[in-house]
Image (cartoon, rainbow, N blue to C red):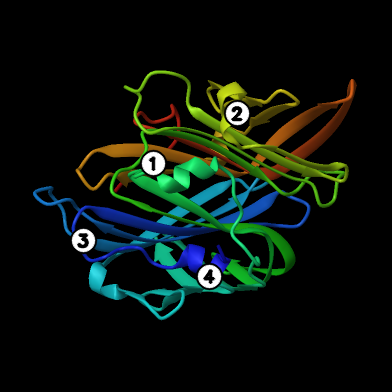
């Protein structure tokens, strides 16, 4: 499907629904990154709380005394509007399939952004095709992968002008949150321009038997490795230790980690009232080993990757912004 269609709003007005559009922008060369999120939330019938629209923003600087700044702005649902085609508005903030603008001031910080990008021609597929035909309670569209952003982001009065900054933009919606998710996205390798990797491991409920659904996709100068099909996800594996993730496919071994101080933490709520804790660093690091025809090639990224930990329990030492 086109990226425009992948981004279109899915809420039909009924209770018990959440919808998310997020954009991660990386400073060319790594070391800094920004995460921007537009959301709506409507509790399930009989659940506590009011419908809301929320702007979220995080700024990451691996070398700063405060390496992760995380803030959000909660609005009534009436502040949200979805226009024709794809255009989302929350108050004065907007997101289209080519622009993102907004400002948040909270907790002594302010983050403002005015960005533009050429959208991807088509949404990327990063999971088995069969999932598109199942009645899953959560769905994700990789609307704009491997895009480049121009514009500016201002954090506490410091302006960052961007030209060709690597970025990714996704759309998530559903009636139930997943309990466990681990995600890696890296478009900024130290000595491999154009390389990119995405890996994820998802478990809708920890009560379900078997390992999480684990996907891995990698592009290098030598070509593309797509371990996201039905056969591949049965062989892929993930291991988690603190703030370290390890993904394995038959030909790729990935290790990703971050300084815990660089994690921005959030509490997300399911429409039925239970919470999950999400911590993300967008200045994480990773190494990649690829085995092809008996040879091993290696990639490395220092402070140029996004790494997410999503689980019912919080990570020790991470400050989470309350729901």
Residue corresponding to mark 2: 231
Left or right: 200, with 118 as reference point: left
Specify which label sits upstream in the sequence, 2 or 4: 4
Q: How many numbered tags mark residues here? A: 4
Residue corresponding to mark 3: 51
Question: Badges 2 and 4: C-beta atoms under 8 Å apart?
Answer: no
- Percent position (x, y) of residue 137? 32, 44
Report crowding for label 2: few under 14, some 14 to 19, many 20 or more residues within 10 A (C-alpha). few
Seen at 40% across and 79% down, the residue is 92
Specify which label sits upstream in the sequence, 3 or 2: 3
Report crowding for label 3: few under 14, some 14 to 19, many 20 or more residues within 10 A (C-alpha). some
Which mark is in front, 2 or 1?
A: 2
Callout 1 secondary element: strand
Label 2 to label 4: alpha-carbon separation: 30 Å
Report crowding for label 1: few under 14, some 14 to 19, many 20 or more residues within 10 A (C-alpha). some
Q: Quadrant of the rendered structure where residue 26 is?
A: bottom right
Specify which label sits upstream in the sequence, 3 or 1: 3
Left or right: 210, with 67 as reference point: left
Question: Badges 1 and 4: C-beta atoms under 8 Å apart?
Answer: no
- Percent position (x, y) of residue 128? 54, 40
Seen at 35% across and 28% down, the residue is 313
Callout 4 secondary element: helix
Question: Badges 4 and 3: C-beta atoms under 8 Å apart?
Answer: no
Residue corresponding to mark 4: 4
Callout 3 secondary element: loop
Label 3 to label 1: alpha-carbon separation: 21 Å
Compared to 264, does 252 lie above or below? above
Q: Nearer the viewer, residue 9 or 183?
A: 9
Q: Nearer the viewer, residue 148 or 171?
A: 171
Seen at 62% across and 34% down, the residue is 258
Which mark is in front, 4 or 3?
A: 4
């Amino acid at each position: 499907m086109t990226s425009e269609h992948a981004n279109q709003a899915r809420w039909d007005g009924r209770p018990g629904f959440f919808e998310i559009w997020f954009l991660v922008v990386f400073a060319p060369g790594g070391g800094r990154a920004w995460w921007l999120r537009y959301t709506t939330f409507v509790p399930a019938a009989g659940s506590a709380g009011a419908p809301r629209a929320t702007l979220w923003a995080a700024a990451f600087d691996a070398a700063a005394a405060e390496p992760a700044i995380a803030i959000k702005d909660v609005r009534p649902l009436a502040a949200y509007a979805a226009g024709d085609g794809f255009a989302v508005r929350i108050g004065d903030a907007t997101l289209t399939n080519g622009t993102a603008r907004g400002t948040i001031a909270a907790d002594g910080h302010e983050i403002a952004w005015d960005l533009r990008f050429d959208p991807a021609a088509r949404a990327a597929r990063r999971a088995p095709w069969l999932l598109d035909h199942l009645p899953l309670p959560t769905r994700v569209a990789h609307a704009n992968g491997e895009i480049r952003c121009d514009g500016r982001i201002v954090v506490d009065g410091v302006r960052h002008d961007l030209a060709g900054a690597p970025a990714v933009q996704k759309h998530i919606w559903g009636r139930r949150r997943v309990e466990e998710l681990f995600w890696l996205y890296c478009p900024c390798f130290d000595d491999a321009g154009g390389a990119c990797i995405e890996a994820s491991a998802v478990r809708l409920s920890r009560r379900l038997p078997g390992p999480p659904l684990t996907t891995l996709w990698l592009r290098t100068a030598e070509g593309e490795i797509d371990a996201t099909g039905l056969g591949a996800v049965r062989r892929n594996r993930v291991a988690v230790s603190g703030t370290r993730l390890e993904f394995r496919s038959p030909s790729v071994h990935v290790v990703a980690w971050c300084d815990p101080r660089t994690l921005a933490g959030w509490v997300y709520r399911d429409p039925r009232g239970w919470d999950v804790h999400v911590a993300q660093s967008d200045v994480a690091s990773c190494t990649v080993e690829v085995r092809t025809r008996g040879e091993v090639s290696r990639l490395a990224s220092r402070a140029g990757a996004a790494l997410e930990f999503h689980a019912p329990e919080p990570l020790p030492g991470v400050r989470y912004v309350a729901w």
